[in-house]
Amino acid sequence: MQNIEQKGGVHMDQHRRVLITQEWNPILKRFDFPPTEAGYEAMKTGIRQFAENEYVRSCCHEVEGLCGAPPGSYFGVPTIEEMAARAEEKRKAEEEAAKRIEAEKRQAEEEARKRKEEEESRRKQEEEARQKREEEEAKRRQEEEEAREKKRKEEEEEAKRREEEEEATRRKQEEETQRKEEEETKMNEEEARQRKKEEEVTAEKEKEAQRSVEDAMTANVAVDKEGEEPASQLSRRDEEEGKCPQPDQEGQSHEQADINKSPEELNDSSGSQVGANLCNSHEDPERQRQIEEEKRIVNGDAKLEADREAAAKRSSEGVTGTADTAGQAGEAASPSINDAENGTLNGHAAVKNQVEEEPRENVSTHQALRPLPVLRAPDSGSEALGVVLREAVVQGVAEGPWLRLLPCSCRTLGVLGDRGYLPLEELQPVTSVTWSCLPMGAAGRFKVRAKHVAVRAHPELRGKVVGVVVAGRMLMGTPHRVAGYLWLRFEESSRKKVGDEEAWALVQDLGGDVLLEPLDADGRRALSNFQGSQAQAADPQTAGSDKVGATAVPPAPTVEKLPTPVTDPVKVSQRVEAAALARKQLKGPLEFRVLAEDHSAPVRKEPLVQSPQLGKLERGELVYGYPGGGWLQLMHSELENSWVFIGTRLSAVWAELRVTARSWNALEVTWPGLHEEKRVAYNVEWRTPEGAAKQMKGHKVSASNKVVLGNLPSGLLCFRVGARVAGAGNNDDQDVKLWGPWAELVAGED
């Protein structure tokens, strides 16, 4: 201290900072002499870190006192009083903090106690509710068990009753079948006896005719000996060319024979008919001058004309049981044409090929103003080969006042030949050929009224015959107007057995008789409209034509309003709504595999068979979509939002059944299922195949994609799986019901 006082002297105020620093350094030996202001501040900050140390605090205050500075003014170290005040404040703050912590602790304990009481109360209520639910569930299960037992007994009684009824029906059918077989046997025997008797009579008549021909020829030889053949040689030649055929039997046997004949057989029958004409000509001496012409026909110079005449004669002699006679006669009349084209010409190909036979600038298209006969030659007195109905579209070449029809138009109209003539004054020129089929109404049911009706691949009277439907059969289809005729286009369900993608049949024949009777109001209305339009054109003369000197003026062509395109808004709306519900309830689109066992699956604009086709799906393709009303709305495809009929052409992948285990009377089957759906229930159905001696069926419900079916009969059985995806809430209308295809599995084998 003495050293500090001596060094201070009178310069202590000026050199206070230097003195303090010099004196401080020896005390703690920590800081060097700071040359700058920042160094001083750093030194003071470092000293204040030890302000709690009593030694440091006393040294600081001592140095400040030696230098004449108030305590704490330079180093900032608090004095004893300040330290006591700070300690008191700190103590009070700690007490306040302790009190606050204690209060929070008490509050937390209170809240925990309240929560515990509430939890205990809630658990107690849940336990009571659980016990109540268990009691209600037990009661409900008991009621369901009683209801199931009651239903099982009722089903057993119903099954027993059905078995008894089926047994009685089967016995009755067997008796009826046996009775019909006996009647048919008797009828066949009677027909055989009648045929034999007629054959004997015919043979006797032939012998008499032959004897008369020989006598006539012998007389001719005696009168004229210039190069005439002897009667015996002529008789032998007639025998070599073929004896006079027996008359055709009328009714069903003749009709069925015509349907089943091949083109070659029809040629033979036509030749036999010409031979019969030859024999009849020998019986009448006045027809001797026609013998040479007849011989020329028989020898093949005009074989096609003879075939046509024979077919026309057979059609007019009583083939009343066979419907669509004009079309079949057309086939029989020109088998050479059918053979050349293999019977596969459709409307569009025929138009294209036949138009090319004539220079394009010579071919014109016309529409009939009224029903007209198709003539063999350009002469009003010529023989009629067929009929053209009102509004029928034809193509041909103008030759003066006549139109010579092209072969394609002859085939479409069912004309008995490849050439025919129509008067141009009864035809109206059109700018283009319109071979499109015009729908006349919505799809409906039709019943076959005629004994047999030919089914054709295209709506042409001489189109390829792909099958025959018999009287009483029910058909589903849409009536169309094609070339002035009313045709029925079969739906898929009606053309399954035909085996063709398209199937057509005449609704009304050329004579005005109804072949297919409509059973729905829409179909009856379409038939009535068609008959009305034909009746309006039945009389081609005007009212003033009856006056003396009046000339027949063809009526001005009337423009008939075409019906709107066929659609069924109710069916389309229902199917669209069903698909929308599936889209709403399902997690995503379902996967389907294209089977298309008979042909490709067409894709349509709307869920309706009459809707325009946009494309097709080939066998083996995998498609995605939402089902609705038996149709699938496609997704994730170029044809998105278009529709394809499921039927037997698509198979749901989720419902493909597979046998995983089997025993002598049980099967374990599995299927992929709908894994993404949570609220789904499955129902596996089984039944015996159609035509089995004893019809049996059953089902079993499962919540998983596996089920064991017991008490199954041995043999081949049909199985399918259905799914029901529950919608939100308890509204059954929001549930989505799905069905997979029927699959055949064998049961009863280990």
Image (cartoon, rainbow, N blue to C red):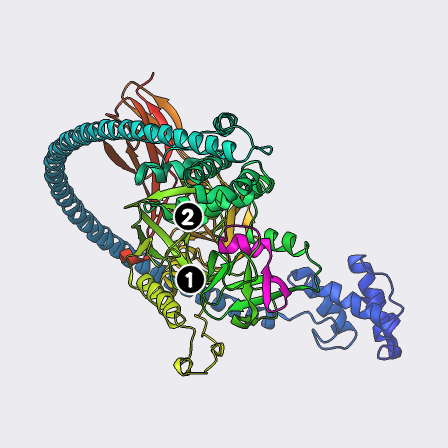
Q: Position of residue 693 (x, y in %)?
A: 23, 27
Amino acid under label 1?
Ile
- Within 10 Å of disc 1 (Cα), the crowding (few <14, some 14-19, many 20+) is few
Relative horizontal placement of residue 570, taking residue 26 as reference (left or right): left
Left or right of 358, for residue 268: left
Question: Is residue 404 found inside the magenta-colored segment of the image?
Answer: yes
Residue ID at (44%, 47%): 312
Q: Secondary structure at mark 2?
A: loop
Q: Secondary structure at mark 1?
A: helix
Residue 613: percent from left, percent from top:
52, 56
Marker count (numbered) = 2
Report which residue position mark 2 lands on.
Answer: 492
Residue 706 lies, in percent from the top left, at 35, 33
First in sequence: mark 2 or mark 1?
Answer: 1
Give the residue number, with chain letter if any, for mark 1.
101
Q: Depth-wise, is mark 2 or mark 1 nearer the camera? A: 2
- Distance, label 2 to label 1, CA atoms, is 86 Å
Above or below 310: residue 727: below
User: Is residue 488 shown to the viewer in this render?
Assistant: yes
Q: Quadrant of the N terminus?
A: bottom right
State which quadrant residue 618 falls in: top right
Q: Position of residue 622 (x, y in %)?
A: 53, 43
Q: Quadrant of the C terminus?
A: top left
Magenta span of residues: 396-418
Q: Is residue 460 left or right of residue 175?
A: right
In the rendered view, would you say 348 is above or below 495?
Answer: below
